[in-house]
Amino acid sequence: MKKRIFIALPVSESLQNEIIAWEQSFSDLPVRWLKGKNLHITLVPPWEIDDTDKIVTLLNGSKFVTERIELRFDRVSFGPNPREPRLIWAEGQTVNQLSVIRNQLYETLGFSPESRPYKLHLTLARFRPEQFASFPTQTLNEKVTWQDTATSFVLMESHLLPTGADYEILVEIPL
């Protein structure tokens, strides 16, 4: 049976709590908020695979050039396309270490790197684009000062449920 997996940076409990507190001000929006444990920063987008053991072995056997990645988010908005949004996400400055680790992961996995530059973002909520017209607000440009430090990345499995995706950490790899 195929598994849908991806590689991400986990979000600390402290940042999860800041996000949950922020979301209270927008509880009137008809969106599916990601639960604290499901918050993550995707480095390698989902793909399907039969057996994750090979991927775990590849990741555990590789050396990555950074020990930590400082993450800073400064704004929350509708995205990825403001004209036809389907997410609420936090955005921030993409530090060089993110691009380096991402490129290393693509190389380790034997994937071709994406042509577009990586943009730091953290999905907070999802909704159907056709619902957007009924939202009480059509603009979202909230300033935030969220910070986190990533000292590991995770291989996650996505379980698609009627209520939205739920994510399970399969293995955590220290940087």
Image (cartoon, rainbow, N blue to C red):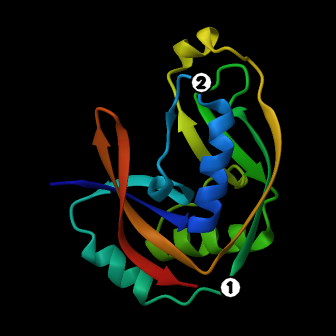
Q: Quadrant of residue 99?
A: bottom right
Q: In what quadrant of the picture does the N terminus appear?
A: bottom left
**Residue 171 % position (x, y):** 37, 76
Residue type highlighted by circle 2: Leu
Q: Is residue 139 left or right of residue 106?
A: right
* Element on which disc 2 rests: loop
Seen from the viewer's position, the closer of residues 142 and 70 is 142
Image side of residue 32 versus residue 21, left or right: left
Instruction: Say which residue label 1 marks.
Output: 66
How much space separates mark 1 and mark 2, taking CA atoms? 38 Å
Label 1: which secondary element: loop
Q: Nearer the viewer, mark 1 or mark 2?
A: 2
Q: Residues within 10 Å of mark 1 (few under 14, many from 20)?
A: some
Residue 24, position in %: x, y?
A: 63, 38
Nearer the observer, 25 or 130: 25
Residue at 35%, 74% (x, y): give it: 55
The reply to whether discs 1 and 2 touch (Cβ–Cβ < 8 Å) is no
Q: Where in the figure is residue 125, as x and y percent of width and height?
A: 55, 37
Quarter holding residue 56: bottom left
Residue 80 shows in this picture: no
Task: Name above or below for residue 120 compared with residue 14.
Answer: above
Which quarter of the rendered picture does the C terminus lie within?
bottom right
Residue at which label 2 appears = 29
For residue 33, side relative to residue 170 (left or right): right
**Quadrant in which residue 42 is drawn:** bottom right
Asked if one can make out residue 33 in the rendered structure from this viewpoint, the answer is: yes
- The residue type indicated by label 1 comes to Thr
The image position of residue 131, as x and y in percent, is 54, 14
